Image (tube, rainbow, N blue to C red):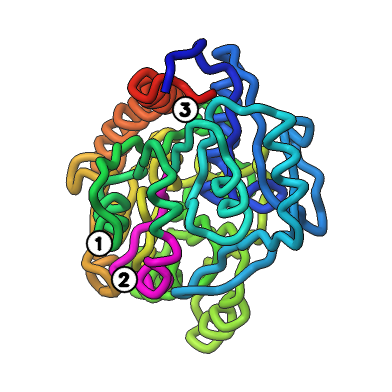
Amino acid sequence: MAKSRAFKKIAIVTPYYYPLYGGVQEYVFHLKQEYKKLGYTVRVITGRTKKEASRDENDILRFGRSVPFTVNGSTGQVIMIKNAAHVIAALKREKFDIIHLQEPFVPFLSHAVINNSTSLNVATFHANFDANPWYRLGSSFLRPIWKKLHGRIAVSPSARKSIEKYFSGHDIEVISNGVDTERFSPKNAPLEKFSDGKINILFTGRIEKRKGLIYLIRAYRELKKKYPAIRLIVVGKGPLLTNLRKYIIKHRIRGIHFEGFVSTEILPRYFATADIFCSPALFGESFGIVLLEAMAAGKPVVAFNISGYRDVVDNGKNGLLAETKNHGDLADKLGSLVKSSALRKKLGNNGLAKAKKFTWKIIAQKNISYYKKLWNTKGGIK
């Protein structure tokens, strides 16, 4: 390829975006915002939803229809495309220099984009898994898409290992997720209704099997007997909410507050309210943005010792890792923080220092540097 001008126009393709919320959505939004600050023109290419309003709708190109599906105890999205002609026309009209696809193997929008792209194609892989039947069964179908990528990124060493189980022959760069250290900060004011001197343990996330909230509730049940002045605050909603409420009533567990879904504006105040943050996810966490959010707020974190979380938590330094699915060990780790304000402060301060290394500005600059390396190597794309 002949060398050409420096790239200026970037598309970020994602099956997950606002008004739906999640880690990939945050990743895409913040990369886009940081790229714009650097002077690039950026568009997000994603699917339509029943409620399309987004805080940055002017930056979004929507195609097809977003359809939820459940796999491995978690809910995902595919973008159904009836006619790729609209996607093809948009690519010709916009003339993107860089197309950065998130989870490019998720059908069908990403496939329509990459099969018709004349841009420099980069993909980020977010998932962490022990096995993926879709990758295994569809490897022959997915391999042509893999080969059309000029660059490949994984958000953690764990995510890289997951993809390398099925696809090899190309280097995969590790560029992590980031955290908004202005939004999540020790400077945020706690919520008055929980500021009564009790030790607040916070969980945020979708209430589904993979997130392991039942193990935290069981651990809390044990802790409550020994430390009456503790409270568990649960932020989020999901399919297991009713069953967990029944469990709590059956076992007469006091002091658990289900707050439901909270706005992005209010969420940082929940972290400010917490004394301890706990994420008992069982598997499938590629990096753990939520752990970085807690660290950025200066809070000690406790999590199960799963691969993606080990990429974030330095056990005993900025958080504590418990044996997976062992609610007794989880209770012990939480209990050590409940009884020691000094330990909470130490781990919280260390976590805050680590979070500052993962600002979105830093992460965006790493992605741009990777684009430039590819662009210069490939000579740009006409």
Q: Element under label 1?
A: loop
Residue 131 badge = 2
Q: Element under label 3?
A: helix
Amino acid under label 1?
A: Lys
**Left of 30 or right of it: where is 86?**
right
| Marks 1, 3: nearer the viewer | 1
The spot of residue 256 in percent (x, y) is 54, 67
Cα gap from disc 1 to disc 2, whole angstroms: 8 Å
Cα gap from disc 3 to disc 2, whole angstroms: 30 Å
| Marks 1, 2: nearer the viewer | 1
Amino acid under label 2?
A: Ala
Q: Nearer the viewer, residue 48 or 222?
A: 48
Q: Quadrant of residue 307?
A: bottom left
Residue 337 badge = none
Mark 3, residue position? 360
Q: Considering only vertical position in the picture, is 272 above or below 40?
A: below
Mark 1, residue position? 165
Within 10 angstroms of label 2, few (less than 14), some, or many (20 or more) residues?
A: few
Question: Quick one: label 1 or label 2, which is nearer the N terminus?
Answer: 2
Question: Quick one: label 3 or label 2, which is nearer the N terminus?
Answer: 2
Q: Quadrant of the C terminus?
A: top right
The spot of residue 282 in percent (x, y) is 35, 68
Which contiguous range is marked in magenta?
Answer: 124-142
- Residue projecting furthest to the left: 316
